[in-house]
Image: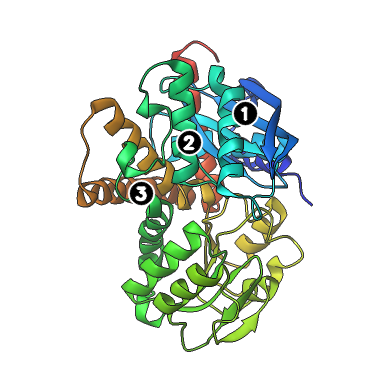
Amino acid sequence: MANPFNNAKSQLSKAGKLIGLKDREMDVLLKIHAIHEKDISVKLRGRDTKLKAYRVQHNNARGPFKGGIRFHPDVNMDEVKALAFWMSMKCAVVNIPFGGGKGGVAIDTKNLSDKDLENVSRAYIQAMADFIGPDKDIPAPDVYTNPKVMAWMLDEYEKIAGKKSPGVITGKPLALGGSKARDYSTAQGGVFVLKQAVDLFDMPPFSTKVAIQGFGNAGMHAAGLMHNIGYKIIAVSDSKGGVYDEKGLRIPQLIEHKTKTGSVKGFGAAEITNEELLELKTHILVPAALENVITEKNAPRIKAKIILELANGPVTPEADEILFKNDVFVIPDILANAGGVAVSYFEWVQNRMGYYWEEDDILEKLGSLMFKAFKDVHSISKAHRTDMRTAAFVLGAQRILEAEKLRGNV
């Protein structure tokens, strides 16, 4: 399995060479501010259990650290470091005043009770409370965490701090200071930038086929949004397998089936594997699951014209080179899935003001921000005749370095 942090360094190196960054500038961009690795003890299924918990804070030159907390058995230090680095770049690309952070607990949540989940959530905050705060580091949901988990974490932090502090965590339930549109913001941001891309290629939605790998929060919401616009969703998959219909899947019914059964399997369409889905003949491919699913091995067989990366790091650097040569237009994760952190920023702003916007206001602000980010990245891509990912890293690196230089750190 490719090391995600090595992938991140490779992506930055390519951008750095393109614009002639000096070694000192590269060192500043790669430097990790702080690493917090803790052993937490929790009661799971009535037994005392030790778990590894992580929080990595990458760069805060442009604002407080920001980034999700994931609960997944494969969480490890290299992954969390890469995700924190990508988060710094993502916030810079969409030009919001945050730096990058990330956290996680190495745990399989699939057979845990709500009480077990609550115990893990509170134990994580107990271990990390000194390192987070509304002006310091603001966590959010990620893989296998959700508003319910954020509510427990918020409550635990406020008990420790001895005061109300809604801005310490985003992705909260609305009743605790969450933002409207936050639950589908990652998908909505992706759909906004996809609109820019399909316009470039003159691909009207009603004749455009889409395959989505990953049917969790981002993938499911993306399917619903695209279906409503008129895209033909021909295949979707989750960790248990996938379904396929060349004529287009009945997305509202499929979402209902997934919600009831926990999987897209058994929906009544042809079955397809995750690997087969990636190589389908489709106009748009949306990897919305985990890292490193498109590699140098399967990249030559990718038939999509556009890849929208709703997952973090789904394409390896080696695969990127192949896709670019094959004229596949990749909208990179640090642009494509930035809608989540953008609306998290809006939530944080609302928490600080104590005044909350309507959903239409938030969508208008998100659309404006995502359209501008796409335009900025695409302009750099054309000017340097490079792929969109490298262009996004150029933009992110320039903005972070500008802040570091103004602070006298470069």
**Mark 1 vs mark 2: in front:** 2
Kind of residue at badge 1: Val
Q: Amino acid at mark 2?
A: Trp
Residue hosting label 3: 370
Q: Is residue 257 above or below residue 334?
A: below
Question: Camera-side residue: 281 or 77?
Answer: 77
Res. 236 image quadrant: bottom right
Query: Viewer-proximal residue, 83 or 333?
Result: 83
Q: Which numbered marker is on residue 56?
A: 1
What is the C-alpha distance between the residues marked 2 and 3? Answer: 31 Å
Q: Secondary structure at mark 2?
A: helix
User: Is the residue under label 2 in contact with that under label 1 (CB below 8 Å)?
Assistant: no
Tell me the crowding category of disc 2: few under 14, some 14 to 19, or many 20 or more residues within 10 angstroms, Cα based.
Answer: some
Dot 3 lies on which element? helix
- Mark 3 or mark 1, whichever is nearer to me: 1
**Whole-number angstrom distance, CA of label 3 to CA of label 1:** 26 Å
Where does the image place residue 399, in percent across and percent down from the top left? 45, 30
Give the residue displayed 42% in from the left and 62% down from the top.
221
> Badge 2 is on which residue?
152
What residue do we see at 63% from left, 55% from top? 290
Tag on residue 340? none
